[in-house]
Image (cartoon, rainbow, N blue to C red):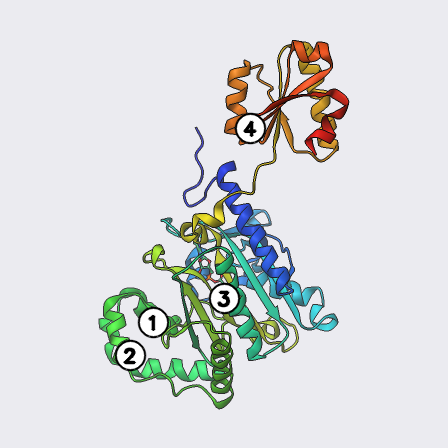
Amino acid sequence: MYQKIPGTKDILPEEALKWQKIEELSRNVFSLYNYKEIRTPLIEEASLFNRSLGEASEIVQKQMFLINSAPSSNVTAHSVYGLRPEGTASVARSYIENNLDKTTGFVKLYYIGPMFRLERPQKGRLRQFHHIGVEAIGLIEPDLDVEIISLASMLLKEFSIEDYKIKINSLGCAKDKKELTDNLHKELKTKLDELCPDCQIRFKTNTLRILDCKNDICQKIIGNLNIKETYLCPECEAHFSSVKQGLDSLKITYQISPYLVRGLDYYTGIVFEITHPSLGALDALGAGGRYDNLIKELGGIDAGAVGFAFGIERLLITSNPKAQVPDKNNLVYIIPLGKEAKKQGLKLLDNLRREKIACDTDYENKSLKSAMRKANDLNAKLVLIIGEDELKKGVVTLKNMASGEQQEIKQDEIITALR
Ligand code: HAM
């Protein structure tokens, strides 16, 4: 028997209702904030991700699902495709390729869809997971960072998720990031042996990541370093202050996290992470930040950009059941008893569907009692019974499942009665 690949999930109908709810609530919020949907392919040239996320990033180093697009003897850099591990690089590619930089300039986009990372699966960490993400491209306005964070907290409010923490930091511009990296190098050189094995590698390839290593010893070493707060240039400092002021004025609670760096190379300036205690060690519900150099880096104009993404699976681990109650079921269930009734029932089913009335029928030739049980399981609102008596009289019996009330309705008055 085949089994699903570790780190992937089947979303069965009952759970799919929760997904639909999360997606519906998200789309409503996106439309409130005037973000428009973008859908990009699930596969891209792998080098797009290498270039955007960084050759040394954990995702590119260890987590990319790669696909050869050419026969295996003929592989070149451009013939390696990658399943997208995140959405930002694809949206940036699309923004440039479709000339949105030249035609529209500033755009506010959102996406909902699957992402793929070859991770060691565990609770809240999958190989195929789903993002709800936004990207606002074309401006370096701090007010936009505030809008993005406010949008994230509005989404969480709609999902009835409470007790989350918003942690923010500024990495500064490329020059500031380099200064911080150089400083770290200097400070950590003498302590290299004490760092965890991962950080010893990071020291060479991705030094900033050492700052948010979760290892206790690394945390302690970093806590004793004297490298923070002063490396931001005046423009980045002013941007950071404006964002903080904007968040304060909207009464959005946040925490400054000087060691938050995020694992992707494209980030510059503001970065943030939203965590929730119910997620344990993998506590990030979502994360994002500015990537003001990426569009230019990929061949577009010099355009500021900011965005974030939530992981849907993690939202669902955290989400208060209130957000998960499916909409009231308006299903009408038709129970035909006997061959002739079944013919009538199928015609009625088709008529109701043409009138946009959600309905289903008993295809299994059940007895009245077990068909009623099925209607109950399906949470049907109304049941239409067609038995011998009903056929003779040219009526159907309409039963209200909530009140138990029953009445006979003439065949040609059914639609009006149901309405
Ligand atoms: P990220 O932090 O890599 O950021 O992913 C965002 C969220 O996706 C995480 O906070 C987490 O909830 C979820 N997530 C990540 N990996 C997994 C996994 N293996 N299994 C389950 N959930 C996962 C980004 O991807 C950036 N593109 C966000 C962004 C958009 N920055 C700017 N714009």
Q: Do the residues under discs 3 and 1 have CB atoms within 8 angstroms?
A: no
Residue picked out by circle 1: 210
Question: 195 and 249: which one is in front?
Answer: 249
- State which mark lies toward you, 2 or 1: 1
- x%, y% of residue 389? 66, 10
Q: Do the residues under discs 2 and 1 have CB atoms within 8 angstroms?
A: yes
Residue picked out by circle 2: 188
Residue type at numbered disc 2: Leu
Q: Secondary structure at mark 1?
A: helix
Residue 78 visible:
no
- x%, y% of residue 113? 56, 52
Residue type at numbered disc 1: Ile
Q: Which mark is residue 338?
A: none
- Of the numbered discs 3 and 4, the one sitting upstream in the chain is 3
- Of the numbered discs 2 and 1, the one sitting upstream in the chain is 2
| Residue 44, placed above or below residue 179 | above
- Of the numbered discs 3 and 1, the one sitting upstream in the chain is 3
Question: 319 and 111: which one is in front?
Answer: 319
The residues bearing labels 3 and 2 have C-alpha atoms spaced at a distance of 24 Å
- x%, y% of residue 20? 55, 46
Residue picked out by circle 4: 401
Residue 215 visible:
yes
- Of the numbered discs 2 and 4, the one sitting upstream in the chain is 2
Q: Which mark is residue 53?
A: 3
Image quarter in which the N terminus is found: top left
- Of the numbered discs 3 and 2, the one sitting upstream in the chain is 3
The residues bearing labels 2 and 4 have C-alpha atoms spaced at a distance of 70 Å
